[in-house]
């Protein structure tokens, strides 16, 4: 059973790499198996619904990785703006490291097949909701009222997603830096609840 789980995880991680860089349609099942090193024929054993099931699993896997990273950043930084800037630095670094070939670990899949794959769309919604929830809780913890914290968390996600696309097209981290700096300034200028102890 441990070996089976190991092969399954390798397939998911390998698919995540390929989907992020080349997209869903351009990444064949043979490519996924080859990169994973799993035995031939194992893909449909672990994923009987085929590539679309792998896509769902990749979104869940990558979504949890990002959620964990955001949670760590929220714990390490002392203001909403600092959280957003820190993740922006990470995004710009990832993009430069891939020579601007990679994008958001889940959006590449979602843009291609979410409209026609209900399970994929549901996985994407769950991932984005989890990211938004982490950010909103952190912003609220820094004194931003609950409803406004949720709105701002959604805005940050939109800004990050758009910045990643622009960075990929421009082959530059500048769109990411520009977006996160504007978002950070807005966040740090937000009024705080009087009893929060945070500066307004």
Image: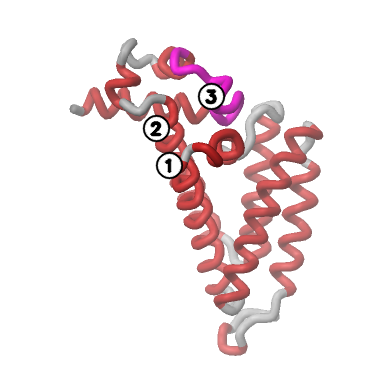
Relative to 111, is 135 above or below? below
Bounds of the magenta span? 19-30
- Say which residue label 1 marks: 119
Whichever of callouts 1 and 3 sits on the residue coming sooner in the sequence is: 3
Q: Nearer the viewer, mark 2 or mark 3?
A: 2
- Say which residue label 2 marks: 53
Residue closer to the observer: 97 or 179: 179
Q: Which element type, helix, strand or loop, lies under badge 3? A: helix
Residue closer to the observer: 149 or 77: 149
Q: How far separated are the C-alphas under marks 1 and 3?
A: 20 Å
Relative to 183, is 165 above or below? above
Q: Residue at x 63, y 54 (%)?
A: 157
Contact between marks 2 and 1 (CB within 8 A): the answer is yes
Q: Residue at x 70, y 26 (%)?
A: 99
User: Crowdedness of circle 1 by 10 Å Cα count: few (<14), some, many (20+)?
Assistant: some
Residue 151 falls left or right of residue 64? right
How far across and down, in percent of the image, does residue 152 sit?
64, 66
- The reply to whether residue 67 is in sight is no
Which quarter of the image is occupied by the C terminus? bottom right
Residue closer to the observer: 47 or 35: 47
How far across and down, in percent of the image, does residue 21 sit?
60, 26
Residue 43 falls left or right of residue 118? left
Which quarter of the image is occupied by the N terminus? top left
How far across and down, in percent of the image, does residue 194 sit?
61, 89
Q: Which element type, helix, strand or loop, lies under badge 2? A: helix
């Amino acid at each position: 059973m441990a070996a089976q789980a190991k092969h399954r995880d390798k397939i998911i991680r390998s698919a995540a790499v390929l989907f992020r860089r080349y997209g869903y349609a351009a990444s064949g099942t043979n490519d996924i198996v080859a990169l994973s090193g799993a035995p031939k024929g194992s893909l449909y054993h672990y994923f009987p619904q085929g590539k679309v099931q792998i896509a769902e699993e990749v979104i869940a896997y990558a979504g949890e990785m990002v959620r964990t990273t955001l949670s760590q950043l929220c714990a390490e930084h002392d203001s909403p703006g600092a959280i957003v800037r820190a993740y922006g630095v990470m995004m710009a670094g990832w993009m430069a490291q891939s020579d601007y070939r990679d994008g958001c670990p889940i959006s590449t899949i979602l843009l291609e097949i979410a409209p026609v794959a209900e399970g994929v769309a549901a996985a994407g919604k769950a991932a984005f909701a989890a990211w938004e929830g982490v950010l909103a809780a952190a912003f609220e913890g820094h004194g931003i009222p609950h409803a406004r914290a949720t709105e701002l968390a959604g805005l940050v996600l939109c800004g990050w997603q758009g910045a990643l696309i622009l960075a990929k097209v421009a082959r530059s981290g500048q769109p990411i830096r520009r977006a996160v700096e504007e978002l950070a300034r807005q966040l740090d200028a937000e009024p705080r609840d009087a009893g929060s102890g945070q500066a307004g």
